[in-house]
Image (spheres, rainbow, N blue to C red):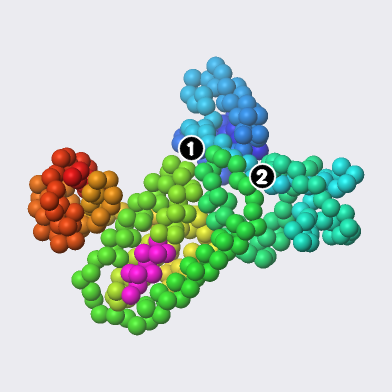
Amino acid sequence: TLDTFVCSSWYYLRFCSPKESNYGFNEEDINYWMPVDQYIGGVEHAILHLLYSRFFMQALSYNDEKFNILEPFHGLFTQGMVCHETYKDQNNNWVSPDEITIIDGEKVLKNDKSKKVIVGPSESMSKSKKNTVDPEEIINNYGADSVRLFILSDSPPEKDVQWSVEGIISSYKFIQKLWNLNLIINEEIKKNHPSSEDDQLVKFTNQFIKKVTQNLDSFSYNILIANLHEMHSSLSKLVDKKVKKDELILNYRKILTVILPIIPHFASECIKKIGVEDSSVWPTVNEKFLIEKTKQIVVQINGKKRDLIEAKSNISESELMNIINKNKNLLKYFENKTIKKKIFVPNRLINIIV
């Protein structure tokens, strides 16, 4: 396992090799990359792995003043298991999904369609219960990125994933939509539009980088997929703004770079298509583009949404009421009525009780 490999490698470099080893490591190097930043593993494996690795670290540090590392990992994250329905035949033998077909809504054996299959509860995939799926077949049919996208989007990473063919197909279709958008962007790049003063694309790109970075750091992978859907929707509209070629390439490259951990094959192919050589550097966020000059504020009358007003950020209640009083669509709700109370949530909503 990785943990015992890391610890035993440290032991070799620390005690068995010369101070300056043939691999260029020395004692300072080892103290730099130990402990490991993050351990990620399923709960079934992590328990014993942590026991082994912690034992090694305790043993290595025993009576050694130079070795001051007591824990092998800075962080621990136990991921959920991938689950699938279980199946049995009439003789109570486990049956794999590959041996089943569906006829008139009933699951039956492929080799004997007269025999129905007993559907059991969804449990974590295991070879003993034969409720595994062949990853090679799934990848050949839908691509590795579809599998990654589905597993990340199904639920938070600490929860179990319920395997679903429908979920894989949905992820596959979304990647096709992203690819169609990529073709449109490449056509826009070829048009080489003149410079535009509109900075909406730059603003969106920086906001997107910020969201993805935060959600990666916090293991909020299912929210990452929501960010990806939002990116597709927003970028589809922004492409029509006739953005200058260099600006479009620069921002699209940044967007593709931050989605590399999610759908690496798709992102790598798109980066190659726009002729970018190096995309290994994670893009930084320009904070000035995160400041929103205007906000959309919901206007409610007696708790019911009646309008959406775009106003400057941090607008005061009195300033907002002045705008509302000039809005013809809202005036009819105030005719012959008295305002009893106003509930104002800055930059979000105002609820007027009449």
Q: Residue at x 64, y 50 (%)?
A: 163
Residue 181: x %, y % from top left:
44, 72
Q: Main secondary structure of the magenta part?
A: helix
Q: Nearer the viewer, residue 173 or 196?
A: 173
Labels 2 & 1 near each other (Cβ < 8 A): no
- Is residue 320 visible in the rendered structure shown here? no
Of the residues shown, which amino acid type is indicated by label 2? Cys
Magenta span of residues: 231-240
| Cα gap from disc 2 to disc 1, whole angstroms | 28 Å
Residue located at (33% from left, 69% from top): 238
Q: Residue 261 — which label? A: none
- The picture places residue 62, in percent across and down from the top left corner, at 56, 18
In the picture of the structure, the residue carrying the numbered disc 1 is: 37
Q: Earlier in the sequence, mark 2 or mark 1?
A: 1
Q: Residue at x 50, y 26 (%)?
A: 69
Q: Residues within 10 Å of mark 2 (few under 14, many from 20)?
A: some
| Quadrant of the drawing holding the N terminus | top right
Residue 110, percent from left and from top: 84, 60
| Label annotation for residue 83 | 2
Q: Residue furthest front?
A: 336
Is residue 232 inside the magenta stretch?
A: yes
How many numbered circles are shown?
2
Look at label 1 and name its amino acid.
Answer: Asp
- For the residues carrying marks 2 and 1, which lies nearer the camera in this image? 2
Q: Residue at x 25, y 80 (%)?
A: 194
Label 1 environment density (alpha carbons within 10 Å; few <14, some 14–19, many ≥20): few
Q: Which residue is at the front of the view, 55 or 229? A: 229
Label 1 sits on a secondary structure element that is strand
Instruction: Name the quadrant of the C terminus.
Output: top left
Residue 255 location (% of width, % of height): 40, 61
